[in-house]
């Protein structure tokens, strides 16, 4: 048996169902919306596990599922040395979003990361504490800012409505995902010209630490032929 974890609700679940369906494998949810049960048709030995998109990276890393579909941003943010824990099998072509750094549109002299670094230093001198950047992507954002020499900031956790934190005075800037930028503009924010951290999309991953014995490997090989990925990537 090979366990496949996919998002348990929303558009990401529906698009994942469509992606597999277009390749001859029918995935469907069974029971009520409160029941995380699913069924598979057209792929012998494949078991469907419904999880939140945020849980899937951890379940892959723990080896409790063999395959998982989730955003590449979540895998990179939740798993240190992610490519040593999971193998990227197939970008799926949907769920696109950019993880970006954005600042108030009213900051006319802050358009680049160098400008942000200078503004953060000035902010600390003026206010006596570090400039706050609201995000839920702590690892990705911290690594990106470190690599680009931005200092004198602190990350503050935001698990929802991140774009509103500047207006609500709980942060001075944000790092969040965006598809169209409309919500950012509505909240009077602008993306730094070099503030793209990661271009995310839904991706099929395999767990390196899962138990690939007892028939799981032949199932993977069969799936690779039907889904179009290299089984030797694992």
Image (cartoon, helix red, strand yellow):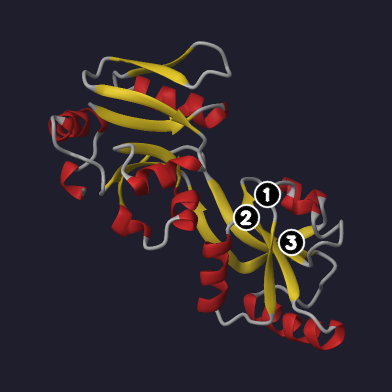
The residue where tag 1 is placed is 159
Give the residue displayed 14% in from the left and 37% down from the top.
Answer: 213
The reply to whether the C-beta atoms of the residues labelled 2 and 1 are less than 8 Å apart is yes
Q: Is residue 142 left or right of residue 175?
A: left
Image quarter in which the N terminus is found: top left
Mark 2, residue position: 136
Mark 2, Cα crowd under 10 Å, few <14 / some 14-19 / many 20+, is many
Label 2: which secondary element? loop
Specify few, some or many for label 1: CA neighbours under 10 Å numbering under 14, 14-19, or 20 or more.
few
Q: To which quarter of the image does residue 69 belong?
A: top left
Q: Residue 165: x percent and y percent?
A: 79, 56
Pick whichever of labels 3 and 2 is earlier in the sequence: 2
Q: CA distance from mark 3 to mark 2?
A: 19 Å
Q: Is residue 233 above or below residue 198?
A: above
Q: CA distance from mark 3 to mark 1?
A: 20 Å
Do the residues under discs 3 and 2 have CB atoms within 8 angstroms? Answer: no
Q: Residue at x 52, y 64 (%)?
A: 139
Disc 3 designates what residue?
190
Q: Is residue 75 left or right of residue 171?
A: left
Query: Is residue 150 positioned above or below 173 on the image?
Result: below
Q: CA distance from mark 2 to mark 1?
A: 6 Å
Q: Are marks 3 and 1 in contact (CB under 8 Å)?
A: no
Picture layout, residue 78 above or below residue 206: below
Crowding near pointer 3: few (<14 within 10 Å), some, many (20+)?
A: many
């Amino acid at each position: 048996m090979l366990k496949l974890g996919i998002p348990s609700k929303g558009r990401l679940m529906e698009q994942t169902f469509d992606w597999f369906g277009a390749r001859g494998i029918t995935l469907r949810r069974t029971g009520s919306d409160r029941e995380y049960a699913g069924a598979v048709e057209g792929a012998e030995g494949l078991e469907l596990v419904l999880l939140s998109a945020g849980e899937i990276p951890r379940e892959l890393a723990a080896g409790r599922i063999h395959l998982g579909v989730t955003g590449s941003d979540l895998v990179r943010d939740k798993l240190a040395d992610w490519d040593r824990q999971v193998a990227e099998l197939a970008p799926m072509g949907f769920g696109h979003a950019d993880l970006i750094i954005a600042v108030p549109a009213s900051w006319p002299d802050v358009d680049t990361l160098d400008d942000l670094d200078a503004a953060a230093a000035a902010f600390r001198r003026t206010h006596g504490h570090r400039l706050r950047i609201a995000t839920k992507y702590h690892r990705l954002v911290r690594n990106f800012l470190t690599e680009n020499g931005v200092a004198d900031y602190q990350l503050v956790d935001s698990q929802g409505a991140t774009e509103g934190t500047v207006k609500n005075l709980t942060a001075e800037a944000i790092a969040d995902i965006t598809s169209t930028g409309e919500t950012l503009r509505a909240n009077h924010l602008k993306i730094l010209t070099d503030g793209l951290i990661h271009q995310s999309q839904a991706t099929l991953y395999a767990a390196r630490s899962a138990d690939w014995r007892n028939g799981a490997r032949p199932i993977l090989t069969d799936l690779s032929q039907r889904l179009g990925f290299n089984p030797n990537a694992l």
